Image (cartoon, rainbow, N blue to C red):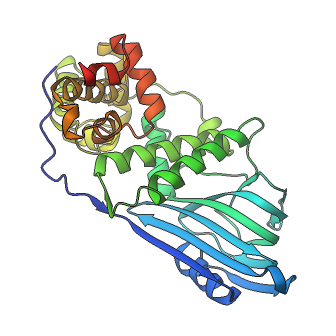
Amino acid sequence: MVSAKRYAGSATVPVQRTDIRACDPESGVAVVKSLVIDHRARISVTDPQRTTVQVRSVNTDGLGADLLRFSGISYHAEGEPSGELVAGVLVAGHGYLGTEHQRVNLGAGGVCLAPMESGWVTALRDPVYAVVRIPLSVVAEHACEVRDPADRPLRFHGMAPLAGTQRAWSATSTFLYRRLMDSGTGGIHPLALHGLKQLAATALLTTFPNTTMTAAYTPGPGQSTPAAVRRAARFIDDHAAEPLTLARIAAEVRMSPRALQAGFRRHLDTTPMDYLRRTRLANAHRDLQAADPTRGLTVAAIAARWGFTHPARFATRYRQAYGVPPSHTLRN
């Protein structure tokens, strides 16, 4: 395997954080409208003694997370669909989210997805809401990486989560929020951000009903010669430190994404994205071997450098590949 070149454009992607605490509900509503989701709001104070507003919002390129707290307040809102997926966990409070044809009643711990194809209304009392936002185009791109691309575009057609997925989405939402908000840094490495987007996209695709769950498997059309697959593998080896996508790899070797998927399965018994993950794991392994822990280098920092943003999952994958935890390699 060719050693990956360091990504020349390794400057971090800016991360913008907003933290608003106020007794004036209108100021919090204005922040939610501008940073989270545009809507028409009507609020009323139900308990003046408890009226507090907190909006903690973090935004970076193609990914956002928010924690919204409106205590002593009844919050009514109406909105229209946009090109962004907005998924929420009602941490506390109660209410509903609905359209003309659907309605999801929400209590503490309830999970929902803002409709993508119709207007919506919501009414919440004393809400504490954790929200993740990501463009539909980013999720659609990732959907092509985890299964053969289908001819029809990606659509989400339900607001409620599938049975048994609610807790997993809540955990993912919490992880994304903490990773972006609590790090305190003004920027994030492009590859680490790409990994967080993949994590969010995977969770959304497995939590909420969408067209990838019903699309039939179709073999990849077009030709994929061994030479073309080798060129694609070399490109992955040389650019593994960049936020690669299936579409970019396919374009580089002048193949369709579906043909590239089929070619990797036929000639390498894997997929392009699995090959990319193995390449990055090998590069992280080499970095751990070469690192000096006395200089403050950590397993988490090296893992994030190669797009592994979830430390526990990286440790599991690393142990499976090398038989020891990554911390053992770093210390020795």
Q: Residue 139, relative to residue 40: is it above or below?
A: above
Closer to the camera in the image, 151 or 35: 35
Q: Residue 11, relative to residue 271: is it above or below?
A: below
Q: Where, by quadrant of the figure, is residue 216 drawn? A: top right
Across and down, in percent, residue 99 comes to 79, 66
Across and down, in percent, residue 290 comes to 15, 26
Across and down, in percent, residue 66 comes to 57, 64
Where does the N terminus fall, quadrant-wise? Answer: top left
Residue 294 at least partly seen: yes
Determine the residue positioned at 16% across, 53% down.
9
Across and down, in percent, residue 70 comes to 73, 75
Determine the residue positioned at 53% across, 40% down.
202
Residue 253 at least partly seen: no
Q: In the drawing, does residue 122 fall left or right of residue 117?
A: right
Determine the residue positioned at 26% across, 35% down.
255
Q: Residue 165, relative to residue 56: is it above or below?
A: above
Q: Residue 30, relative to residue 129: is it above or below?
A: below
Closer to the camera in the image, 299 or 160: 299
Closer to the camera in the image, 139 or 247: 139
Determine the residue positioned at 63% across, 75% down.
54
Q: In the drawing, does residue 273 fall left or right of residue 131?
A: left
Where does the C terminus fall, quadrant-wise? Answer: top left
